[in-house]
Amino acid sequence: MITLRNSSRKIILFAVILGLAVFLAGCGKKTVSIPRSGRIITTEGSSKKGSSVVSVARSQIGKPYKWGGASPAKGFDCSGLVWWVYNQHGVRIPRVSWQQIDAGKPVHLSRIKAGDIVFFRIPGGGKSLHTGIYTGDGKFFVHSPKSGHYVREESMNKAYWRKYFVGARRVL
């Protein structure tokens, strides 16, 4: 049996608590203010990287929702899916939605492109922000909706999503 000194126990306890905090962050419950810069980015079309981001996001369709999840093996919460997809492309963004809203540059709804991150403020359910990846195709996005559901692609033109849309960010 290994005997640990008091300082080693503290380090291990800190690492366990930190790991648990990151795992439980998911689509955090922190209330945030949404940037309202109104800046419109005027570039048109989607990039090769944006198309690749969409392809990787779509490859996860059917994976289960898992609160705090950020991998195909365990499942995804909304921000975990976005984080994982961008990580596959070497793009580092924050893990949780309330931090992702500050990543990259704001994009006006009329100028979003495939690969942009879209955000929604969903009332109730304890989530302050919901996030997904815009796929283009007439305002569709891939997201991991909620417990008991699976990653899917859905239209942002549905009244529900239009009502709660709060912004988009370009990180590519």
Image: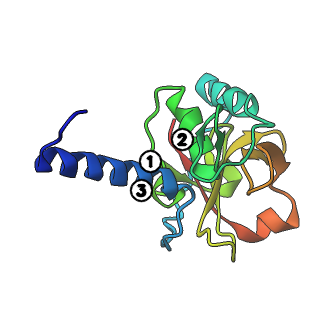
**Secondary structure under the numbered disc 2 in the rendered image:** helix
Q: Are marks 3 and 2 in contact (CB under 8 Å)?
A: no
In the rendered image, residue 165, in percent from the top left (x then y), is placed at 69, 64
At 59% from the left and 25% from the top, the residue drawn is 49
Closer to viewer: mark 3 or mark 2: 3
Horizontal side, residue 93 vs residue 164: left or right: left
In the rendered image, residue 102, in percent from the top left (x then y), is placed at 45, 56
Q: Earlier in the sequence, mark 1 or mark 3?
A: 3
Which residue is labeled 1 in the image?
94
Q: Residues within 10 Å of mark 2 (few under 14, many from 20)?
A: many
Q: Residue furthest bottom?
A: 124
Query: In the image shown, does 3 or 116 lie closer to the viewer?
Result: 3
Which residue is labeled 3 in the image?
21
Q: CA distance from mark 1 to mark 3?
A: 14 Å
Q: Is residue 42 visible?
A: no
Q: Residues within 10 Å of mark 3 (few under 14, many from 20)?
A: few
Which residue is labeled 2 in the image?
83
The disc labelled 1 sits on which kind of residue?
Answer: Pro
At 83% from the left and 39% from the top, the residue drawn is 137
> Does residue 25 sit above or below 31 in this rendering?
above
The disc labelled 3 sits on which kind of residue?
Answer: Ala
